[in-house]
Amino acid sequence: MKQKQGQRRVVQGFSPNKLGIPETAKSSMNSEPDGLKPSTTLLDRAQSFIHGLTQRTGPLTDQLVRKPGAFGLGQVPARLKPTATVNLVCGFCATGCSLKAHLRDGEAINLTANEDYPVNLGMACPKGWEALTPLDAEDRGTTPLLDGKPVDWQTAADTFAQRMKAIIAEHGPESVAVLSTGQIVVEEMAFLGAFAKFGMGIKHIDSNTRQCMATAAVAYKQSFGFDAPPFTYADFEESDVLVFIGANPCIAHPIMWQRVLMNKRSPKIVVVDPRRTETAMAATHHLAIKPKSDLTLLYGLARLLIEKGAVKREWVDAHTSGYEAFAEFAQAFTLERTSRETGIEAAALLELATLIAEHERVSFWWTMGVNQGHESTRTAQAIINLALMTGNIGRPGTGANSITGQCNAMGSRLFANATSLIGGHDPNNDGHRSKVAGILGIDETLIDRTLGMAYDQIVDGIAEGRIKALWVLATNGSHSWIDSERYAAAMQKLELLVVQDMYPTTDNAKLAHLYLPAAGWGEKDGCFINAERRIGCVQKVRRAPGQALSDFNILRLLADAWGCAERFEKWSSPEAVFELLQQLSAGQPCDITGIEGYAMLEREGGVQWPLRKSEFPITRNPKSEIINAERRLFEDGRFFHSDQRAKFFFDEPRAMPEPTDESYPLLLLTGRGTSAQWHTNTRTAKSAVLRKLYPQECYVEINPADAEALGVASQQVIRVSSRRSSVEAVAVVSACVQPGQLFMPMHYEQVNRLTFAAFDPHSRQPSYKACAVRVEM
Amino acid sequence: MNEGTAVTLVDTLLAEQQSLTAVERFSQRHDRDALEGLGGRYSALLPVAPPGPGEQYAFEVNLDACTGCKACVVACHSLNGLDDDEAWRDVGLLLGGKRGDAYQQTVTSACHHCEDPACMNGCPVGAYEKEADTGVVRHLDDQCIGCGYCVLKCPYDVPKYNERLGIVRKCDMCVGRLREGEAPACVQACPTSAISIRVVKVGGMGVSPVASKTGILPVFGTEGILPSGAAEGRMPYALETGKMPVLLGLVPGAFDSSYTRPTTVYRTTKIMPQNTRPADAGLLRLEHAHWPLIAMLVLSQMSVGMFVVLALMGSHSSSIYVAAAALQMGLGASVLHLGRPLGAWRFFLGLRKSWMSREILAFSVFAGMAMGLVTLPMVVALPPAIEHGALVATALIGLLAVFTSAMIYIDTRRPFWKASLTHGKFFGTAAVLGTSAVAALMMNRGMVIAALSVRVLLFAWERTKYRKALDDEASDWHLSARVMKHRLAGVMDGQEALFLASLVVAVPVMVASGMGAVMAAWGLFIIALISQVLERYCFFVAAMGMRMTGGYKA
């Protein structure tokens, strides 16, 4: 109906007498109808004849016709008009946007961003818009593969059980390890952790979240007493000063940046980053520090804030411990030293200190530039210290806030049963042990009192022959692990490598003895927990190809083959597991006992933890009729340590592990390339339209001064070499990297061949962002 | 688990995996949401009222807000139901500055819905319309014959050829959405509201004489792109009271098209460093070769050349059959270039502006006369004077047809296809192949000398021009010359070898007689033919068409 009106308007518009159409537009009207007066002149007849030769409709035009799509969608392509829609949280990054799947016969045919969700408010980044496309890839796994040959599921499951059991029998339970992911739903993560430890009886399970947020988790746990990011995205809109450290949200988290631009307080935006990133361009202040000098910068700032009297002593005394020692420690970081070691002029440091001191609401945000460093935990805690000492926590627009990477990093941190006993519990705490054993209905002796090894220790264990079997789920260490050639060499030593993934074609899956085809995001139910602690649902809106099964169903099958199915009888469906996790969370900081099933998560636009049973029903926002959608932690100044105080942690900065020298005079930085690429690009590379948005060949950014000195022209293929390897890349000459530095995006497999394997001692997170290299022609 | 029954756990799990229940469980709520007020949300990004007389819709981009997420590109793809790799928006990147003022800026662009669209003016069959009420340049998909000329004509690389459909498709500013008060896909999808739709004055896209001299004067009451003349070193902005500055000219790297008058408005408050360049500046791109067009051009020009030679000789030899056959082959090849040739009979719809229409007309007349010349003598004996007159007339029409061929490319305004080069090459091909073919067919030694002379002159002229453009960085087709040197080195060497070979082969023609001379003459012709095919290949592949600011192209 409306379409017709539109057409009528066009016809009206073609009357030049009425509208006085300008000269340029008239020229095109020769081929147009003039339905309002009879054709009399020869010219009119000619025009009418010509009009008859113009095909305005037909099968090709029909391909692009747009019609009202209902469901609040506005116009959609007519051939993709949905019969229903459901919402599901995106399966890429930790922003946790809600996407609206357009369904026909229950199956998703298209997708838009959900306007009603408090996270993304109707927006999505390119990955989100294209989230369905990787499901249709031609190289999806459709059947289990044993030594590259298709086998049925029963054979695959039996092989898994028999060979794993044989290795455990011969080499002990510590000879088998699991490398998991932050990309699967929390119910599956929990099931995996429970099955590995309480079913298979193995000890070492870690995941790729070690590469992205281990630092934030450890820093929060030590400082706050629990791994608890305090913020809500509304804080982006509520701040007077936002300080981004090692974060490039314009590219890495564009939908969070949307919230920054919605800030109506004319905020000052400070970016601390060696590169002039997209975010640095958009900021009001950019501090282009020397790589890995951020710890010094933060301690120097602390000293300046003390000097300025910006410390909220009353609050600090009431709610923290260890401030005095920290204040004394910070005295060594004089303005002169800080300026010299960071490469930032004293005036700029003073200006930043003034900004922090003189504004009511200051929020600090960090991402991988901090988390992926050789002293990352202390760096994150130096940020936390700044927030604590200035009282910038627990109020709107404040906080020491970790923006993390993967869609379910938070779910992994709480419920993966890897870095804590499931639900953020302590495996050595008798109360926790009996609580968990009771809820899960397992024998308490099945719970090991110590945690397993971290990712790097597992890789070492494989390289040294102590670990004989590895089970990898939804991650691609052959590309993503630091010093990746060493990782690849370790894979060759395994007696059994099982890879469970959507694709048998990832770098890691290609090495597998046994490949298990997994259903992807959109092909299964469950929940993700995003960076602001919001639990949101994903739905099954697509049928998995061939015999691919959800990780959840694969785990049911493997438990059955292992002979321990009765131990997991309670783990019958994702929603049943969610109820188990709620019970496990009771009394913990992440208590979610107040959530009434998936239906409530769907209805309320996700729920941030905690939501205790006693809190429900909680305040409702009368306007949106959803529960108070944005909630932050520590509003009462009480932290999760037993004394309810936050702690100050600090250490002397250490030199970077592989500094430049005469042989390798340039420092290689790595990071995200574009918002259209996700990590190792196993999924995003499947979308033809996403592939248009980034270079297909590996590239390296180089400063014009270095390029001139080396005789490198833009677009020229050059060789970048480190002590580990040597790779080719196309040179892009850009002043956005500083002289003496190079930048390469992590999405290209070559890049981690170069990186130097150094780790933060507390979080064991790899330091991806600094290694010495040289350039050759 | 299911022991004792025929159904195994694997069967159960596989069945469960294939059942979709999300609709039953979660879609009820959405059933109520029929067409909610999408418009309200984007009201600030849409004009208050539709364009009035003398106005049209235009995209406006706030570069300060564009931070490079590229959601606009993918939303265009998804919300318009485009093919797998199809999107009507692109995002380029500007890089500039030095240490301390390092500069990068992403640039989103779609169709600029020009006031005087080059695509529309080039279309031979009227498959483009500029809507009188909105100014939106629409492509009529069912009218399109897939000739791709608009792709060459657009200075911003906007229309894209769709292999699957054999037609071109392009951005229509989601005009159907605009009519319903909805925002276009890209406007809806931009997380930072960087893209908006504005109403601009038609004819306001020009620059006032004062402004063009100073480059920076306020241009009150004018919105839109101001063709720059903003040379390097001048601040490329126009200031308007109460508004963000408008960039003069589109953005660095974008072709400054004052003849099409693009309507997109780019605004920024940031100072662009003087050395700002597109990230793909200096990239040596190979363009599409268009083999059917290579065949068409070379064969049709050879045919015209032969007719001219025969007319000059006053001889109506059997060579005329070869000339007519070459023309038919050339025209036949040109049909292969069309995605949907069945609609090509409508070519006359574009005669007023499209050189392609004129070329089709000229070659149709030429082909008709040529066929008449070949077939008529078989039926009736014509007086020699009339026959010669007809031959001369045919040759003249042929020359006119070659002129229209050249104008097709000249009219795209690509520097490598400028008039002096294109006319020289096209008429040069006619001269070289016309003389060589007639020389071989008639074994005319004088004609061989003529052919060889033309060949030497043409080659020397081409190489001199090429060297000059290669050495002179300021040459307008320096980049094309670089493409030829660095990416077409094999073809260029081959050309040289062929030229030397023709000099060697020329010797037996001069000294020998009989079969040796005949074979050598044919050899000369074949070498010349191959060399002209290679030349035309370079002509297309090294064209370096204009486009918007590009991004990293590693």
Image: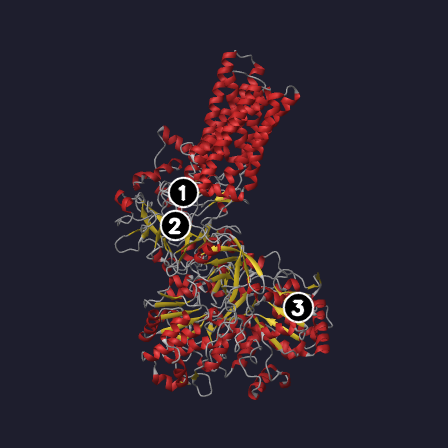
Badge 1 is on which residue?
B474
Viewer-side residue, B307 vs A82: B307
Q: By what rule are the colours in the image chosen?
A: secondary structure
Looking at the rendering, which quadrant does residue A175 occupy? bottom right
Image mark 1: chain: B
Image mark 3: chain: A
Label 1 SS: loop
For residue B121, above or below residue A338? above
Mark 1 → mark 3, Cα distance in angstroms: 60 Å
Mark 2 → mark 3, Cα distance in angstroms: 52 Å
Q: Is residue A757 left or right of residue B193?
A: right
Q: Is residue B227 left or right of residue B359?
A: left
Label 2 SS: loop
Picture coordinates of residue B269 (x, y %)?
Answer: 32, 57
Q: Is residue A34 visible?
A: no
- Tag shown at residue B252: 2
Mark 2 → mark 1, Cα distance in angstroms: 17 Å
Residues packed near mark 1 inside 10 Å, few (<14), some (14 to 19) or many (20 plus): few
Q: Earlier in the sequence, mark 2 or mark 1?
A: 2
Badge 3 is on which residue?
A498
Q: Disc 3 residue type? A: Val
The answer to whether mark 2 and mark 3 are in CB contact below 8 A is no
Viewer-side residue, A319 vs B298: B298
Q: Quadrant of the C terminus of chain A?
A: bottom right
Picture coordinates of residue A60 (x, y %)?
Answer: 50, 44
Residues packed near mark 2 inside 10 Å, few (<14), some (14 to 19) or many (20 plus): many
Q: Disc 1 residue type? A: Ala
Picture coordinates of residue B303 (x, y %)?
Answer: 54, 26
Mark 1 or 3: the one toward you: 1
Q: Disc 2 residue type? A: Pro
